[in-house]
Image (cartoon, grey):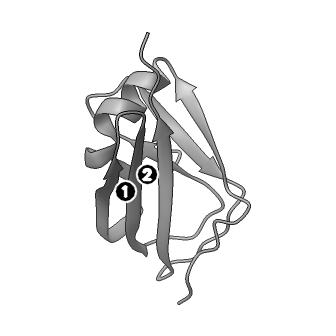
Amino acid sequence: MAMVDFTNAKITPTGENPAKYAYMNMRSSVLLDASNNFIVTNSSVTQTKNDPKLMVFSYAGTFTTSGTEFYIWNASASSRWKVSNISFSSGDTYSFQIPTTLTCL
């Protein structure tokens, strides 16, 4: 059991409408593998900053499988975010933050 290193992690949107996903649904998202299987336990998502132009979401939990990538997904969103360039094993804990910059048009 180890803490997963996200130093070189990459996050990329998949599907359509990533802006809607980032702004509206990150608090209630889950972590999945490429086959849409749940891969974590004891997971939490907390909004740690809520400024007019910046929101920060903190994720924490324990992986239940091994891999090198996962997806952040929410049932009400039309897209997923792929997190890659990492390595984790079953029982490893994770803790990472995603800052979201808001642009009003």
Q: Secondary structure at mark 2?
A: strand
| Residue at 70% from the left image edge and 66% from the top image edge | 7
Give residue 75's mark. none
Q: Where does residue 33 sit, x and y in percent of width and height?
A: 50, 51
Q: Where does residue 1 sit, x and y in percent of width and height?
A: 53, 90
Q: Where does residue 45 sit, x and y in percent of width and height?
A: 31, 58
- Lateral position of residue 53 relative to residue 2, left or right: left
Between residues 100 and 41, which one lies in front from this camera angle?
100
Q: Residue under circle 2?
A: 32
Q: CA distance from mark 1 to mark 2?
A: 5 Å
First-in-chain label (1 vs 2): 2
Give residue 38's mark. 1
From where the camera sits, is residue 32 visible? yes
| Residue at 40% from the left image edge and 62% from the top image edge | 59
| Residue at 56% from the left image edge and 29% from the top image edge | 14
Tell me if label 1 and label 2 are in contact, CB under 8 Å: yes
- Lateral position of residue 31 relative to residue 44, left or right: right
Q: Secondary structure at mark 1?
A: loop
Q: Is residue 25 above or below residue 37?
A: above
| Residue at 44% from the left image edge and 29% from the top image edge | 102
Between residues 45 and 87, which one lies in front from this camera angle?
45
> Which residue extends farthest front?
52
Going by the numbered disc 2, the residue's amino acid type is Leu
From where the camera sits, is residue 36 visible? no
Q: Quadrant of residue 62?
A: bottom left
Between residues 92 and 90, which one lies in front from this camera angle?
92
